[in-house]
Amino acid sequence: MKFSGVNVFQLISVGPDEASLFNKFLDGHDFAPGTRRGFILDLRKFAKWFAQANREPFKVARVTTRDITDFKDCLRRERGQAVATVNRNVVSLRRYFIWLAEQGHVPANPAKGVKELRRQLLAPKGLERPLVRRLLREVELRQDIRVGAIFSLFLFTGCRVSDLIALELTDLDLGERTGWVVFRLGKGNKQRTVPLPLPARRALLAYLETRPPVQSQKVFIGERGPLSDRGIRALCDKYSAIIGIHLHPHLFRHTFSKQFLQDNQNDLPALAQLLGHESLSTTSRYVRQTHEQLADAADRLNY
């Protein structure tokens, strides 16, 4: 097989039998072009490392579990490759050796017991304030009153898309000084009442003044009736194209959660109540730091 005009194992000490085996593996699977390319790059990388580390030609029959474990450690500790990259290499080797074992070319799969690296759990990503301002400004410039109300509900209540599309007129309590929204059909059919800050109340009142006079009690109405999950996501896609950031309903929930904690001294119990979480452990993921925050914290370390 050729890859970009170059033999898979060119410049690596590999015999023709090894190259033929790998070609059979590739040809025996209906891999997408990108997946096929990934396998080639990963095995080429391992074969080169194997020959250099063991000072012998690469042969699948000579590969041990220690080889794959040491290769994994080399990629992470010595070469500093990303966790996702290291794990992809391990998975590629595991799949190749599974095939080799099934075909009887090796007695057992040496990659079977090699675990992938654990990813560090980080806070879910949300929009930063400048991006939220940019988004809402684009909505205002287009006088898109309905979208302004929808995005405001997402940003100021952290509701799910299922909460929003189930919302009915009687679920809204909009006053001059206070306002509340009742989400009746949360996860597990649990009901919760969430306060509406002034910007959200204003956006909702502006929309209700222009809402089509239809029989449905649902708050948000489209051309063919109440807006669906698909309709909400289509609006997100529209503004994704406008501001160049992929928007989706859960991104707004992450944005609300992170901003709420930043502005309220990490008040987890309050956030859990607003989001409808039963367990604080579910809410606590929003306290985890982002890569950027961890990097800033590390830079402040001094001896």
Image (cartoon, rainbow, N blue to C red):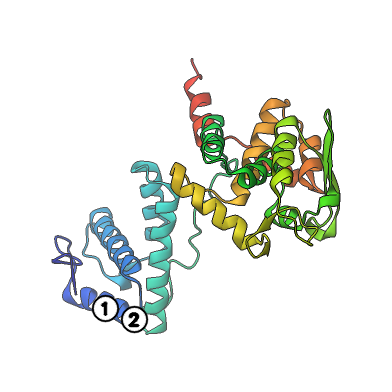
Instruction: Locate residue 70, reporting x and y percent.
Output: 39, 53
One can see residue 246 in this view: no
Other residues around mark 1 within 10 Å, as few (<14) / some (14–19) / many (≥20): some
Question: Residue drawn at (17%, 61%), measured in percent from left and top?
Answer: 12
Q: In this view, does 262 lie to the left or right of 290?
A: right
Residue 105: which disc? 2
Between 21 and 287, the residue placed more toward the observer is: 287
Query: Residue 259 location, x and y as percent?
Result: 65, 32
Q: Where is residue 9 in the image (x, y as percent from the top left)?
A: 19, 66
Name the kind of residue labelled 2 in the image: His
Q: Which of 93 and 135 is in front in this view?
A: 135
In the picture, residue 203 is in which quadrant?
Answer: top right
The Cα–Cα distance between marks 1 and 2, rounded to whole angstroms, is: 9 Å
- Which residue: 53% across, 25% down? 297
Image quarter for residue 7?
Answer: bottom left
> Which residue is nearer to you in this view: 51 or 123?
123
Query: Would you name the residue on which mark 1 appears?
Result: 21
Image point 49% across, 57% down: which residue?
116
Which residue is pictured at 35% across the width and 74% down the height?
A: 31
Q: Quadrant of the N terminus?
A: bottom left
Q: Is mark 1 on a helix, strand or loop?
A: helix
Q: Are the residues at dot 1 and dot 2 in contact (C-beta closer than 8 Å)?
A: yes
Q: Is residue 176 above or below residue 116?
A: above
Q: What residue type is labelled 1?
A: Leu
Q: Is mark 2 on a helix, strand or loop?
A: loop
